[in-house]
Amino acid sequence: GETAVGRSPAESLCLPAAAPPSRRGHMWANVNAQSVHQQNAVSLMQVDMLQLGVLQTQMDNLSVQATLLIGFALSMWGGATLKPLLEDDSQICIWKTWYHLAFAAVFFVTIALCISCGGIIVSLVLYIKQAAQESALLVSTGAAVANTRRHLSSLNRLFVVSYASFALSAVLLIVLYVGMPARLPTPYPVLERAHMNDHTWGSELESLVTRFDGVHTITCLDPRSPASHYNRFAYGAAIAATNTLIIVCMSAWGYRLYAVIRRSYMHDELLHWFVGQQAEQKRRAERLSRAVQLQRGVTCDSTG
């Protein structure tokens, strides 16, 4: 119970000596710096999550607009629109001349392209929203925001293609309905009135009309011409094959794009890309800073 001579009570009880005032101030400064750093990190994460929410809202709007375009484009492929264009005796059929077929081919191609691009947008938005949330929670909020912004730019360009295709198809539909001649001259004469009493001949020749100047005109194909039926079959098969090929190719391209986006959200790939992007942004900032300083030096020399 006795204390050694020359020792303080704290030293005799083996208690640690109090730190010098300068050392304690340094420790408190480190604690405060760490606290400020953590608060800044939390604030940055909250800002990144807000930015991610804004990007997801933009993707939702893009998906809704793409869905509307798909619906309108499918209505152009509906029976009410296609039936007058494809009937043999319709005044707005597409089988009359080569320019009718050319406008119709571009019309069908743009509709297929619009539907394909819209379907790709809707499908990719569903995956990107889920992948971005997962990456923000498990990897990095900053990396998730930067990667999502990059893919959103690609989706915007794809939407521009879809909208342009829809607008062009609408213009072509108007041209096909009201901008083309309803009747064309034909070398085939109209049969005598005696033959019109026959129900069969009458139903076939409803599209043939003789004008007052004696020119024979027809609304679409002559049902008596084997060549006309063959041309219709050949052109129809070509248009159908072209539209099918466009949809299949765009679906394959959309799946490839999905695979690229999926790989970009993998943890290692995302971190590697994000670090490289930050390094590239730092180099650009340094080059810009050097260019500004050089410009200022030139300005100062010229004014001096």
Image: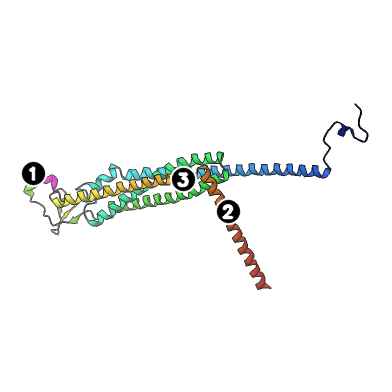
Locate residue 52: give its quadrant. Answer: top right
Provide the residue designation for mark 2.
Answer: 279
Q: CA distance from mark 2 to mark 3?
A: 22 Å
Locate residue 184: give its quadrant. Answer: bottom left
Provide the residue designation for mark 1.
Answer: 198
In the image as oriented, which residue stretches furthest toward the front?
4
Q: Could you tell me if residue 172 is visible in this image?
A: yes
Q: CA distance from mark 3 to mark 1?
A: 66 Å
Provide the residue designation for mark 3.
Answer: 261
In the image as oriented, which residue stretches furthest toward the right?
5
Q: Which tag is nearer the camera, tag 2 or tag 1?
A: 2
Q: Amino acid at mark 1?
A: Asp
Residue 133: image x %, image y %? Answer: 53, 39
Q: Residue at x 77, y 42 (%)?
A: 27
Q: Amino acid at mark 2?
A: Ala
Label 3, residues with CA under 10 Å away: few <14, some 14-19, many ≥20: some
- Which numbered tag is attached to residue 79? none
Q: Which tag is nearer the camera, tag 3 or tag 1?
A: 3
Query: For the magenta stretch, what is the residue range?
Result: 197-205
* Residue 200 within the magenta-colored segment of the rendering: yes
Q: CA distance from mark 2 to mark 1?
A: 85 Å
Q: Quadrant of the N terminus?
A: top right
Horizontal side, residue 32 vs residue 95: left or right: right
Query: In terms of depth relative to the viewer, which is nearer, 300 or 200?
Result: 300
The mark nearer the N terminus, 2 or 3, is 3
Residue 132: image x %, image y %? Answer: 51, 42
Q: Which tag is nearer the camera, tag 2 or tag 3?
A: 2
2 and 1 marks in contact (CB < 8 Å): no
